[in-house]
Image (tube, rainbow, N blue to C red):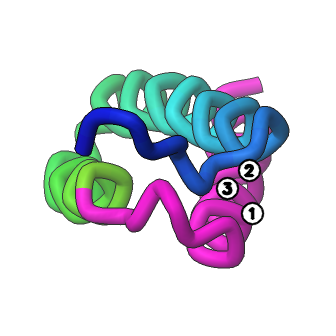
Amino acid sequence: MPGTTSPWRVNDVVAYDRMRETAVTVYALLHAASQRDELARLRRQVLTVDAYDRAAVSALTARLDRRLRELSAATA
């Protein structure tokens, strides 16, 4: 709607962008580990998260961070 402002605060955009960047890294590691089912499921979660719901973005980011640590440890 023209003339209205977004309910996002600057730090919400940063949190959302960080979640998306982490997701890309996890996607790559899952792809390399041939975890295609998990990759597809995770991709759906990232694409469907409500970007305006800070709690949902934070929760998904925490899951992505946890999975990133697991996958990084497995490949180290």
Which residue is disc 3 drawn over?
61
Tell me the crowding category of disc 2: few under 14, some 14 to 19, or many 20 or more residues within 10 angstroms, Cα based.
Answer: some
| SS at circle 2 | helix
| Residue under the image location 51 percent in, 34 percent down | 20
Q: Which residue is mark 2?
A: 65
Residue 65 among magenta residues = yes
Q: Indicate left or right for 37 with 16 as reference.
A: left
Q: Is residue 25 left or right of residue 3?
A: right
Task: State which quarter of the image contains the N terminus.
Answer: top left
* The disc label shown at residue 36, or none: none
- Discs 1, 3 touching: Cβ within 8 Å: yes
How far, Cα to Cα, is label 2 from label 3?
Answer: 6 Å
Which of the 4 quarters of the picture holds residue 21? top right
**Mark 1 sits on what residue?**
62
Q: On the rendered image, what quadrant is the C terminus found in?
A: top right
Q: Nearer the viewer, residue 70 or 66?
A: 66
Q: Is residue 53 above or below residue 42?
A: below
Above-or-below relation of 23 to 66: above
Tell me whether circle 2 and circle 1 mark residues in contact (CB < 8 Å): yes
Please tell me whether residue 74 belongs to the stretch shown in magenta.
Answer: yes
Q: Horizontal and vertical percent for residue 35?
A: 27, 48
Determine the image quadrant of residue 62.
bottom right
Q: Position of residue 67 (x, y in %)?
A: 64, 55
Residue sitting at 66 percent across and 35 percent down? 13
Indicate the secondary structure of the residue bearing disc 3. Answer: helix
Q: Which residues are magenta?
A: 48-76
User: Mark 1 and mark 3: span between their CA atoms?
Assistant: 4 Å
Q: Is 10 in front, or is 76?
A: 10
Main secondary structure found in the magenta portion: helix
Q: Nearer the viewer, mark 2 or mark 3?
A: 3
Pointer 2 with pointer 3, Cβ within 8 A: yes
